[in-house]
């Protein structure tokens, strides 16, 4: 499948089989089929140990770092699991997300995530955005991440590259992530809106996503969260907080205070673009305090030096 990020992460035959399965199921779905029957022997075969993965693909890779041993658990091979017909349907056609009570095997998770991504890449629910976009910006990072960042929507750079947070604000986010001892590959980064908000008649500039656009797109994010099951979500900026929590209290009041989103602790903080506009040490420190709180919640090691970042007297 051209452009599939999993190409180098699986054996060729498994990749071909996966591509063919997704293509077939998408075809069925396009023809209005909503359920597929699966023979018991197929289910038994699916419950067998997964094929060996030659090299971890970019979206699945979780770099383990010596300085953050508690963050990513060792890559123990999960026991093979039975995949119920409903989970198979979910993995293949993504009609419904898996529930937290039914954790997927790592292979089923890869398949489900790939199918979700394929579906999002083909989305035309907002015809104006589908017509104006260069790329659907699905998300990037480890699908086993314990820490997930959620922004509002792609900007011009993200639209061009098909990856969230790669522009100036994104580069600052990368630095913030690195300051925790992690890398972009250790976490998962996504937006509420997967397409860049269009600005008809304007050659440049951004606009805030509308509530309708966020409502239309957020089911993809829900499925991402349900599959990844992060331990902590960091919401970046007022629009992300509004889209996720429906709160219009104001980011200044909300930041630094734990919230809960779909059962997951969520820390609202300032958007990195705000920090680019306001370079004061005190605002940087506020974001850093929110990150320290997230690190504490995750059980990440915090050095004295990290604790004192952006404190004038240190
Ligand atoms: N701002 C966002 O909210 N998301 C991006 O991906 C880039 C900038």
Image (cartoon, rainbow, N blue to C red):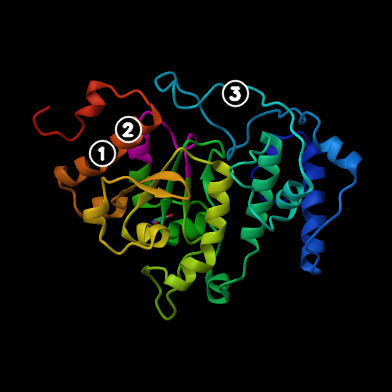
Name the residue nearer the viewer: 281 or 293: 293
Which residue in the protein does label 3 denote? 75
Q: Mark 1–mark 2 contact, CB under 8 Å? A: yes
Q: Secondary structure at mark 2?
A: helix
The earlier-in-sequence mark between 1 and 3 is 3
Looking at the image, residue 165 sits to the left or right of residue 53; the answer is left
Which residue in the protein does label 1 denote? 288
Which residue in the protein does label 2 denote? 179
Q: Nearer the viewer, mark 1 or mark 2?
A: 1
Residue 4 at x, y = what percent? Answer: 67, 48
Residue farthest to the bottom, as pictured = 201
Looking at the image, residue 309 sits to the left or right of residue 183; the answer is left
Residue farthest to the top, as pictured = 66
Give the magenta part as a residue range.
Answer: 174-188
Residue 49 vertical position relative to residue 167 in the rendered view, above or below = above
Q: Circle 3: is it few (<14), some (14-19), or many (20+) Cα within 10 Å?
A: few
Residue depicted at 19% across the width and 53% down the height? 278
């Amino acid at each position: 499948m051209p452009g599939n990020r999993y190409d180098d992460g699986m054996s060729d035959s498994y990749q071909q089989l996966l591509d063919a399965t997704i293509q077939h199921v998408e075809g069925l779905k396009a023809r209005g089929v909503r359920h597929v029957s699966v023979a018991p022997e197929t289910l038994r075969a699916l419950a067998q140990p997964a094929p060996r993965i030659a090299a971890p693909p970019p979206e699945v890779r979780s770099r383990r770092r010596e300085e953050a041993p508690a963050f990513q658990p060792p890559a123990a091979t999960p026991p093979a699991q039975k995949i119920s017909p409903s989970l198979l349907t979910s993995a293949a056609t993504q009609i419904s997300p898996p529930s937290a009570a039914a954790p997927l095997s790592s292979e089923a998770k890869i398949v489900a995530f790939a199918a979700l991504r394929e579906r999002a890449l083909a989305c035309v629910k907002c015809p104006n955005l589908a017509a104006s976009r260069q790329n659907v910006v699905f998300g990037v990072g480890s699908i086993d991440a314990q820490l997930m960042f959620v922004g509002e929507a792609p900007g011009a750079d993200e639209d061009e590259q098909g990856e969230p947070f790669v522009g100036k604000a994104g580069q600052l986010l990368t630095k913030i992530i690195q300051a925790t001892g992690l890398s972009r590959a250790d976490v998962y980064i996504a937006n509420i809106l997967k397409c860049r908000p269009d600005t008809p008649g304007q050659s440049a500039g951004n606009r805030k996503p509308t509530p309708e656009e966020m409502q239309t797109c957020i089911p993809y994010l829900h499925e991402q969260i349900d599959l990844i099951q992060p331990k902590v979500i960091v919401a970046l900026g007022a629009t992300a907080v509004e889209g996720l929590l429906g709160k219009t209290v104001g980011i200044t009041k909300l930041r630094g205070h734990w919230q809960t989103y779909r059962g997951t602790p969520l820390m609202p903080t300032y958007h990195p673009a705000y920090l680019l506009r306001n370079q004061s040490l005190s605002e940087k420190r506020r974001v850093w305090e929110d990150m320290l709180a997230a690190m504490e919640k995750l059980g990440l090691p915090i050095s004295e030096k990290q604790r004192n970042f952006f404190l004038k007297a240190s």
